[in-house]
Amino acid sequence: MKNTFGTNISLTIFGESHGAGIGAVLDGIAAGVPLDLEALDLAMEKRRARGDGLSTGRVEPDRVKFLSGVVEGRTTGTPIAILIENTNTRSGDYKKTQDLLRPGHADYTAWAKYEGWQDARGGGHFSGRITAAAVAAGEICRQILEGMGITLSSHIARVAGLEDAPLSGEESLLKSQLEALNRGSGFALVDPDRAPDMMEAIREESRQGDSVGGILETAAVGLPAGVGEPFFDSLESVLAHLAFSIPAVKGIEFGAGFALADMTGSQANDPFAWAEDRLVTTTNHNGGVNGGIANGMPLVFRTVVKPTPSIYKPQQTVDYPHHTAATLQIQGRHDPCILARAAVVQTAMTAFGLLDMITARYGTLCHTHGLPGRETPWNMD
Amino acid sequence: MKNTFGTNISLTIFGESHGAGIGAVLDGIAAGVPLDLEALDLAMEKRRARGDGLSTGRVEPDRVKFLSGVVEGRTTGTPIAILIENTNTRSGDYKKTQDLLRPGHADYTAWAKYEGWQDARGGGHFSGRITAAAVAAGEICRQILEGMGITLSSHIARVAGLEDAPLSGEESLLKSQLEALNRGSGFALVDPDRAPDMMEAIREESRQGDSVGGILETAAVGLPAGVGEPFFDSLESVLAHLAFSIPAVKGIEFGAGFALADMTGSQANDPFAWAEDRLVTTTNHNGGVNGGIANGMPLVFRTVVKPTPSIYKPQQTVDYPHHTAATLQIQGRHDPCILARAAVVQTAMTAFGLLDMITARYGTLCHTHGLPGRETPWNMD
Amino acid sequence: MKNTFGTNISLTIFGESHGAGIGAVLDGIAAGVPLDLEALDLAMEKRRARGDGLSTGRVEPDRVKFLSGVVEGRTTGTPIAILIENTNTRSGDYKKTQDLLRPGHADYTAWAKYEGWQDARGGGHFSGRITAAAVAAGEICRQILEGMGITLSSHIARVAGLEDAPLSGEESLLKSQLEALNRGSGFALVDPDRAPDMMEAIREESRQGDSVGGILETAAVGLPAGVGEPFFDSLESVLAHLAFSIPAVKGIEFGAGFALADMTGSQANDPFAWAEDRLVTTTNHNGGVNGGIANGMPLVFRTVVKPTPSIYKPQQTVDYPHHTAATLQIQGRHDPCILARAAVVQTAMTAFGLLDMITARYGTLCHTHGLPGRETPWNMD
Amino acid sequence: MKNTFGTNISLTIFGESHGAGIGAVLDGIAAGVPLDLEALDLAMEKRRARGDGLSTGRVEPDRVKFLSGVVEGRTTGTPIAILIENTNTRSGDYKKTQDLLRPGHADYTAWAKYEGWQDARGGGHFSGRITAAAVAAGEICRQILEGMGITLSSHIARVAGLEDAPLSGEESLLKSQLEALNRGSGFALVDPDRAPDMMEAIREESRQGDSVGGILETAAVGLPAGVGEPFFDSLESVLAHLAFSIPAVKGIEFGAGFALADMTGSQANDPFAWAEDRLVTTTNHNGGVNGGIANGMPLVFRTVVKPTPSIYKPQQTVDYPHHTAATLQIQGRHDPCILARAAVVQTAMTAFGLLDMITARYGTLCHTHGLPGRETPWNMD
C-alpha cells in the first residue's frame, strides 16, 4: 500500500519537490469536526523553512488548500484532500550535478527502482518537503485527539551533542510541557533557554559545510488503556511504521528503549499501583505500552534523525550514467539540521497513528462524540 | 488489520498459550515451491524451549502440521495453514495468581482491552509461544529468499552485558557468517566460543530470580537494489512494524542507528564507488537502505529485547478485581532470557517482510521463477 | 489480499477439499460475545451434504473445532480460528479423470495459475467445501447482528424454473419470515409447501445426469441508517465482493435490480414518508441502499447460482497435459443443485460484510455493548 | 478503506460536486509509462456533460491536471495525483430545496451518516461528477493494459427499452468492436446507427420530466489465463466491487448471468477445445472466468444502471429537518439518462481492477516490461 496507510482512517501522500504541489488525502474522519485553522497554520509554520541559517533557503508560504472534505471550517465526513503548492523551485541547481549520486540520499535507490524515469529534481518524492502534507493531515488528527482529552507533542531531545531538559515523569506536569511545546516555537525544547547554544552548534557545523543529527522525543498523555491491536498492529508497530516514513529517521525506541538491553527484569518491570481510583505504574520503562496496548500511562518514544545528507563538503561518489568515479560538490539549498522541522512531522504522524487505533475500538463517530466517560469540547448542534 | 499483515503476501496469526494450538496462515506464495522440511524443523527447534535453565521448563515438540497449501512437500499456491498443537499446558500455575497483574506484562492491558473476557491462561494471545507459528511461516519465506540468492539470519549481539563478535562489513564474509548462523545452534552467535560466558551470566541472574535483556542483530545479503515502497511502506517501516510484533522488542535501529545522533553528515554519509561492475558504498551507516529502498548493500538492523518480565523475585503490584495492593510471587515456568529463542523469530519476521516487498516489484511468480538475472536452484519441471 | 477480507473485522479462509481440513480465522470480534453453539450447529447442518439425492453423497459431520479465540463459550477478543476436519475423502474418484478438464470448473484456470502444482483432488481450494468455514465464521457475525437487533436470512427464490413465495414488503412480516428461515430447513423457502415440487424437479434433472441453477435472495431487517462507506466500500460493493466469493455465483442485483433497466425515474424512485417518528420509503426499489449507504429500509438482494458444473452426462473437453481432445465422463459424488447448501453460505457472508461495515462506524466495542439506543440481550457482567 | 481501493496498485478518490475540485491518486504504477494524452482527453470528453438534452446543462471542460507522478508525459513511479477543478457550480439551485429529501438519491443516507454536516451542494461526494477523476486514473490503466495486448471497452447494451447490436462471440471481431468503441463516440454503441432512435427515446422521457435506465456491457480481450485471486479477490469480486462504486449501478452479471438460473449444467458448461495451440472454450457462458480466475476467453459482464433519480416531475417526499411531508419539484441541471457517460466510467474502473490483478501475478515492473511472451509497444530506452 505504498503511499496510503491506516486501517480505520487512512492517509494518502502524493507529490514531488519540484512538481505542481504536494498533498495528502485524509479519509475516514467523522463529519462535523471544527478545525482550528490557527493551530493548523502554526503547525505548518513550524515545518516551514525559514532561511535563518538553520534551514534551507527555499522559503515558501506552505499555505494549506482544502480541495475537498471541509466546508465552512467543519469536516464533511468525506475525504479531506489537502494541496500545498510548490512556489519556489529552482531545479537548475540540481541539473548541474544530476548524474552524480549524492551519498546518504535516495538518488541511487530511486534510479534502481524507477529505472531512470524518477523525478530527480530536488529529491522528487523523497524530498522532506512532502512531509508538509502529512503535517497538515496529522494536525487535524491531533486536534481531534485534543478534543478527546489526549495531548501529544515532540521535542528535540538532543542535537549536535547537546541535550534538552527531560520530559517530566509526572503526568500533569508532562501535560503542561506538551501543551507548551504545541504553543511554542518550531525549535521545540522543553527548556527554550537551551536553544541559543544548540543553534550556535548547528550553525558552526553549517559553516564547516557539514550537518548534524539528533534525537526527537514524542509523548502523549491521556490515551485510554486498551487501545492497540496485537499481534501485528500493536501501538509500537503502527507508530514505528509511521516514524520510519519520515525521511532521515533511522531508529526508534519506546520507554527505556535500548537501555533495557542492560537491565534486569526487576529493574525494568513497572510496578502497578492504585492512584486514587486509577491504575498507574510507579515507573514507565515500557513507555505506556504493554503487549502492544496502551496501559494509560504516558506514551513515550524517541527516534534518531540522521544528519542531513546534503552537505557542502566535497564527497566521493560516482557519476552513475557515465559509470565513473566523481567528486560531488553539492549545490542547492539545504538544511544543516532538520530536527526542528521534523519534530512537528513526528507529532503529526503519531497523531494520525493514535487516532487510527482509537477509531478501531470506538468507531468513526468517536471523533465528534468523544470517548466513553469523556466529553468533547465541541458544540455539535 | 490486527492479526494479519502484508500486502502482496500475507500472514495471519492465531492462538493462545493454553488453547488447542497456535497457528498461522501464510497466503500468496506461488505454487510449486519445494519446502526444505529439515531446515524448517531446525528453525522450530531453535525457538523451542529446552528446559535447560535458559528457557522455560515448558518443553513441547512444536511439530508443524500443514492443514492446507502443501502437497507432497510443495506449495500449491493456496493458503498455507500451519498448526502447532499445545501439548504441555499447566494452567493451574496461573490460577493461583490470576488476579494479580504481572508488572511488565500485558495482564492489565488485556483486561482493559478485553474487559475481563481475555484468555489469561499462560498469557493467552500475548504469550511468546504464538511466535512459533510465525517462525514456521517465516522460515518458508526465508527458503524462498535463499532460492533467489538472498541470505539472512540473526545473532545475539549483546546479552547480560556481554557482546558477540561483530558481523563482518565485508559482504562475502558476512554471507558465510549468516549461513553459519542458520546452520548453527539456537544460541545464535557469530563467535560460538562466547556462549559459555553468556549462558553463565544468564544463569546467574536466573538464580537470583531475575532475568536479562539484550540486543538482537539481523542482516541480509543479496537484496536487489530497488526493493521497498516509500512513502509509507519503506523497508524500514515494514521491518520495524514486524519487529515490534515480537513480544519484548522495545526498539529498533538500522545501520549506525542511534549513533547517528552524534555524527555529522560527512561522517554518516556512505560514499558510492564502483566495485567491478557493481555499485557499492564504502561504508554502510545506512544499513543498506536509502530513502526506504534497498541499495543493494547488506541490510543491517538491531532490536532491543527487554528482560523477560516474568521473574521470581517478589514484586509490588495490585489485585485488579479486588482493587487492593498486593505482592506478586510468580509461579509457572519462565525464561530468564528470551534472546536466543527470539533470534529465529526475528529472522522469520524479516524474511516475511522482505519477501512481501520483493513480491510487490516482481510478482508472485518470482517465488518459483526467480529474480531477473538470477537463477533459482529449484527444478520446476 | 487473496484469502483475507474485511477492514474492521477480517476473515481469512484456508483449506482444500481433500487436505487435512478446511478452516477460517475470524479476527476483530470483541471479547465476551456468548456464542449460541446450537444455532451454529444448525447453520453447519444446513450447508452439510445429506446424501439425499439433492446433494453429494460425500457426507461428513462438519464439526466446528475452535482452535483459538473462544473460551467457555465466549469470545476472548483474539482471532477465532475454526477448523473443520476432512474425514470422507475419496481422491481415487478424481485420479481416473484428472488430466481431463471439467467444463465450467476451475480445473484449467487452476492449472494456468498454479502451473501444474495445484491440489487438484476434489477441486482443491475451489471446492464448495471450503465455504463450510465461512459459514461458521459468518454465523458468529449473524449472532452478533441479531444481538444488535438486526435479522437476516436467505431463501431459494427460484430453482429449476420454480419460484418460492416472495419475501414480504412489510417489515414486521419480513422479519418473521427471516426468523422462520433461520430456524427452518436447509431447503430454505418462505413457503415450505413448495419444497416437494422443487425437489422433484431437481431429482428429475439429476436422473438425466444433469444439474440445475437458480436464484438466492437475501434480506436484512433492522440495519441502522448511515452504515456503508462510499466511494469504494459501499454496502453494495462489499456485499457483492463477498457474494462473488461463493463458488457458482455469477450475478447479483439489489432491490429491483435488472428490472430497473426498463423503468423510468418516476417508477424507480422510492418516495420518502414519515411512519410515526421514523423515516421510511413507501417502495423499496433500491433494496435499502442509497448512495452505497443503508437507508434503514430492508436490505434486499438476489444472486444467480449457475447449475453445478459436475454432471454425469458425457462432455466434450480436452486432455490438458496430453494436448488432445477427449470426452469426459465425470466420476465422484456431486450435487445436482447447490442452491439449498449455498443459501446459508450467502447469509453467512452477508452477516460478515454487514458486521464489518457496522464496526467501522461504531467500533469493535459495539459487538458487546450494542448500538446507540438499542440494548443487546447479553449479560456482560 | 472507504475511498481507497486496490492491493497492488491503489486508487484514492476525493472531491465534492461543488467544492474546489475532484481528484484521484493512482499509486503503484511503474516508472516510465508514456501516457497517451490524446486518448486521455477523449475518455474525459466521453464522460463530460454536453448540454445536448441527453446530459446535464452543467458543462465543464474537465481538464485533467497532474499534480504529481508525471513528468514530460511519462510516469515517475510515484503517486499520480489528478485534479479536475470545478468551474461551473450553481449551488443556488440546491438551496431552494435542500431540506427536501430527493427520492432515489443519497440525501437521506448522507444525513444519517454525516449527521447534518455533509456537503449537500450538488450531491456533494455522491455526485456522479466525482467519477471524472476515476475515468482519468482508469484510462491510464487501460493504456497500460493496451500496451500489454489487452483491449477493453464498454457499450450501452440497452437503454429506454432499445437494444444495441450484440458484442461478437468471435474474438478477433470482438477486439475490433472494442477498439471501435474506444475510438468512437461517448454514446457508445456497437451499431452507431441505432443511436438516433435511442436518443429520441431518451429525449421523449426527458420531455415528460422523467428519466430512463439501461444496461452497460463491458468486455476485455487478451487477458492472460491465470489472473485472479480466489477465495476473496476473484476477478468477479474485484470487478463487482468497483462496478458498484459507480453511482446508479444496482446489479452486475458475468457471462450468461441471470439466464443461468434456468439453464441446466449441460447447457451452461463451456466445452474446452484446442484452437491451434491455444486452449479455448466453444461457448462463453462463464464470461471468461472460472473459479474466479481468467481462463483466457473474453471477459464479459453487464451492469444495470437505474434511471437518474433527479427528475422534474413532482415527487412525494419529506422535509427532513422540519419533519413534515412535502412535494419536491427538483431544480438544477440533470441528465435524463446517464448510461452514455457511465460507459466510460465502467471501462475505467474495470481497467483499474484488471491491472491490479495482473500486477499481483507479474509485479509492478510488468507495466513497462510487459507480460511474459508479449512485447510492449513502448520504447523504454
Image (cartoon, coloured by chain):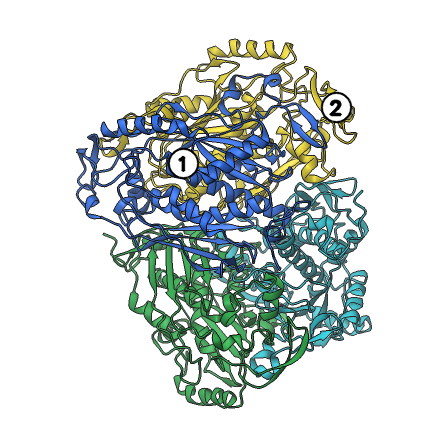
Chain colours: A yellow, B blue, C green, D cyan
* Of residues D262 and D279, the one drawn nearer to the viewer in this rendering: D279
Identified by mark 2, the residue type is: Ala
x and y percent of residue D48 in the render?
A: 74, 56
x and y percent of residue D205 in the render?
A: 70, 71
Residue that mark 1 sits on? A377
- The mark tally for this picture is 2
In the structure shown, which secondary structural element does the residue marked by tag 1 occupy? loop
* Of residues B97 and D68, the one drawn nearer to the viewer in this rendering: B97
Quadrant containing the C terminus of chain A is top left
**At x 57% / y 73%, what residue is drawn?**
C105
* Of residues B211 and C246, the one drawn nearer to the viewer in this rendering: B211
Q: Chain of mark 2?
A: A
**At x 68% / y 16%, what residue is drawn?**
A312
Lower sequence index among marks 2 and 1: 2
x and y percent of residue C91 in the render?
A: 47, 73
Residue that mark 2 sits on? A325
Q: Residue furthest front?
A: B193
Identified by mark 1, the residue type is: Pro
Q: In the figure, is residue D53 to the left or right of B10?
A: right
Q: Is residue A360 visible?
A: yes
